[in-house]
Amino acid sequence: MRILLLLIILMFAAPLSAQTLEQEVRALREEIQRLREELNAVKDELRARADTVEQMPLVQAQIQEHAQTKVETTSKFPMKVFGTIVSNTFWNTAEPNWLDVPNIATPYAPDARTGSFTSTLRQTRIGASLDGPQIGSMKASGFFAMDFFGGIPNFQTGQVMGLPRLLYAYIRLDGEKTAVQVGQDHMLLAPRNPTTLAGMSFPTLYRSGNLYLRVPQLRAERSFGQLRIAGGLGAPVAGDFRSETYEFAPPNLSGERSRTPAFQGRISWSATPAGPYEKPQWEFGASGHYSRERLASGTDSSWAAAVDFDATVDRFGVGGELFVGRNLDAFGGSVAQVAKSAGGFIEGRIAATRQLSFNGGFGKDRLFDAFKFPVALSQNSTVFANTIYQFTPEFGAAFEFQRLRTEPLRSAARKNKHFNLTFAYSF
C-alpha cells in the first residue's frame, strides 16, 4: 500500500512542478513588462521636466513683459507706467536764484564768499499713458506726468523732500488728420527747448530767450500733408502770483480777473522723421499769443510772436527760436518782469556716435523801451555746452556747463558759472 502511494506521488510531481514554473515565468515576464512601462514613464517625465527648465527663462521674461505693459485700469483699457530717475550733482561759483536750474544771477557782496555745491533728485518724474476707446473715427488716449520740483517742506532737512508738481495731464482724441486735446500741456507758443539732461523740470535757457509754460488748455490740430495748424484757448496765467506760504486754493489775480482766456496758435511745416536724433529732418514753425490782465490801474495786454526751427543733416543738427512780446513774465520772458522784450536762442548738435553727442548754444532776453517800465533788470543771457552719453537707451549720463550773465539797469552785471553732472534712468 505504501509503495502504491509513493508511485502515485512520483507520477504527478513533475507536471505540478512544470505548471508552477510556467506560472512563475509568466509572472516574471509580466513584472518585467510592468517595470519597463514604469521606467519609460519615468524617462518621459524627466524629459518633460528638462524641457520645462529650459523654457523657464523665456516664460519669466514673458511674465515680466506682461506685468510692465499690460497694466489695466478699472475701465479695462491698457495703461503704461513710465518714469525717469534723474540725479543732478552741481556746483555754482556765485549766487543764482535756483541752485540746480539757475536762470537769474542774484546780487552778492563783493567781499563775501560765494558759491555752492550739492546734489538733488527732485527732477525725477513719473507718469502714465492710457489707451482709450474708439469714438467715431477718432482714438481716445490720456497722458499724465509729474515731478518733484514743487518746492520743499518747512523742515530742517526739507531740501531732500521735494514736493510733487503736476507737469502734464490731458485727454486727447486723434483722427487721421485731426486731433482735439483738453488738459495741461506745453503751450503752443514757442514749444522748442535746447537738448540737455540737466534741465528737465525747467528747460535750459529759461529766462534767457527760451519761453516756457505748461498750462491748462483746449486746442485743436489739423494736418495738411507736411503742414500742421494748431489753435486753442488757455488759462489766463499772468505770472503775478507771489506768496511766502503754502496756498490751498489758487488766488484770483490779474489774469483770472480779466475774465477772458488766453489765445494761442501755431503753424508748422515739417519733414518725415529722420536723422540720428529720431526727430524730423527739418521743421519750421510760427506761433502767437494774446491774453489780457486786469490790474488796479486798468486793463493791460500780454502778447507775443515767435518763430522756431530745427534741422538735422546726417550727424549735425541746429535749432532754436526767436520772439518779441510784452508782459511775458509768466513764460519767463522780459527777464520775469512786466515789460517789452525780444530774444531767443540757438543751439548746435553733433552726434559723434549713436551713443555720444555734443550740444551747445546761446540764449538772450533783452528789454526794449525800458524807460517806460519801472523794472530792475535790462537783459539776461546764458551760454551752455554739454556732452551726453547713452550707455543704453534707458540709461544716460551728461556733463553740462552754463555761464549766466544778468545785467541790471543801473549796476554792474552779475555772473554765475554752473557745472552739472546728470544721471538719468528711464523705465
Image (cartoon, rainbow, N blue to C red):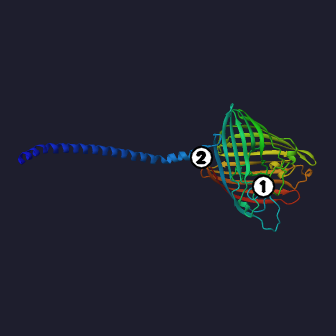
Q: Which quadrant would residue 15 be assigned to in this image?
A: top left
Q: Which mark is residue 77?
A: none
Q: Which residue is mark 2?
A: 68
Q: How many marks?
A: 2
- In this orientation, which residue lies closer to the viewer: 240 or 358? 240
Image spot of residue 285 (x, y percent): 76, 40
Whole-Å distance between the Cαs marked 1 and 2? 38 Å
Question: At x 81% / y 60%, what residue is drawn?
Answer: 106
**Where residue 124 sits: x, y (%)?**
68, 53
What secondary structure is found at the residue carrying circle 2? helix
Name the spot of residue 246 as percent of width and height, x first: 80, 56
Disc with the residue nearer the chain's start (1 vs 2): 2
- Asked if 403 appears above or below 128 in the picture, the reply is below
Q: Residues within 10 Å of mark 1 (few under 14, many from 20)?
A: many
State the residue lying farthest toward the top: 136
What amino acid does circle 2 point to?
Gln
Residue 326 visible in the current orientation: no
Residue mark closest to the camera, 1 vs 2: 2
Q: Looking at the picture, which amino acid does disc 1 mark?
A: Asn
Residue nearer the viewer, 302 or 143 = 143
Check contact, mark 1 vs mark 2: CB within 8 A. Answer: no
Let me know if residue 36 appears in the view. yes
Q: Which mark is residue 103?
A: 1
Disc 1 is placed on an element classified as loop
Residue 398 versus residue 11 in the image, above or below: below
Q: Is residue 282 left or right of residue 393?
A: right
